[in-house]
Amino acid sequence: MGGEEGGTRSRRDSTLDRLVRRLVGRLGAWFLRAIGTTWRVERSGEDPLARRDGDKPLVMGIWHGGLLAAAYCWRDRRIAVAVSLSRDGDWIDAVLVRLGFAESARGSSSRGATGLLRELIRRTRAGEPIAILLDGPRGPAGIAKPGAVALARATGARLVPIGIAAAPAHRFGSWDRTALPLPFARVRIVFGESLDVPRDASPEALEALRAQLEAELHRLDAQATAAL
């Protein structure tokens, strides 16, 4: 999960660690708010955050590479993002909180995965909208991990894939090729239809739904890119 990675933290934060994290959070959030005001953001499809669907909870999925654009576009909405327990995850969490996101759900897709899923289930049932970076934290890029489908199954949440594209944008050299839209870029967001995950789904059905989610997110990303 978005990162879906981390495990229990073996290091203790020093005073310097905490100061650097706060500084990164302030500067990163300020930068995204500043550059984001120049973007032309276009949306298509039904925004799941604007839709009222009774008391049904919401889980949204994007690729890790779209995180920066999504962070600006969904600022100040109190969305909880699953973030790894790594140092990079610390910095992502610090920026997101300064952008008006809820405190991140921290955990791992390998060590400690059960604890992270339990926390996400609790927060989803409490009514918090959840966002998951489906191929995080280390990839491979464009391959959806099973966590989002498992969460939707456990909670009955709407699972909504969202495609994101931007041009012009700088692509970082990281595994996910994270995109930073440049000043005055066009950002296109395409909301997909929600996937329903039955509570009694078999392991085979869950894998089929994971593959369906992955394919749909690739389609939405391609649709967003084609519209630029």
Image: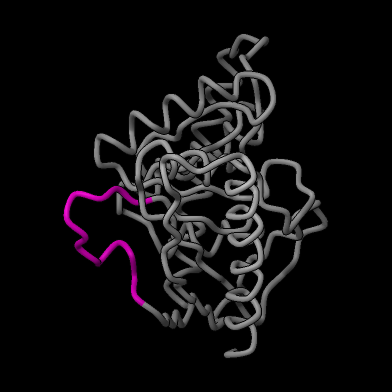
Name the colouring of the figure: one colour
**Residue stretch rendered in magenta on the structure:** 46-58
Q: Quadrant of residue 7?
A: top right
Quadrant that contains the C terminus = bottom right
**Most common SS among magenta residues:** loop
Q: Position of residue 25 (x, y in %)?
A: 50, 40
The relative height of residue 51 versus residue 227 in the rendered view (above or below) is above
Q: Residue at x 45, y 50 (%)?
A: 197
Locate residue 114 relative to residue 152 in the image: left or right. right
Q: Position of residue 54 (x, y in %)?
A: 17, 55
Q: Which of 161 and 16 lies nearest the eye of the viewer?
A: 161
Please count the marks in the image. Answer: 0
Quadrant that contains the N terminus = top right
| Magenta-colored stretch includes residue 47 | yes
Q: Which of 124 and 17 lies nearest the eye of the viewer?
A: 124
Q: Residue at x 50, y 43 (%)?
A: 201
The relative height of residue 82 versus residue 196 in the rendered view (above or below) is above
Q: Quadrant of residue 158?
A: bottom left
Q: Residue at x 39, y 79 (%)?
A: 45
Locate residue 212 relative to residue 115 in the image: left or right. right
Locate residue 170 relative to residue 40 in the image: left or right. right
Q: Position of residue 100 (x, y in %)?
A: 34, 47
Q: Quadrant of residue 171?
A: bottom right
| Magenta-colored stretch includes residue 32 | no
Q: Residue at x 76, y 47 (%)?
A: 139
Q: Position of residue 73 (x, y in %)?
A: 42, 65
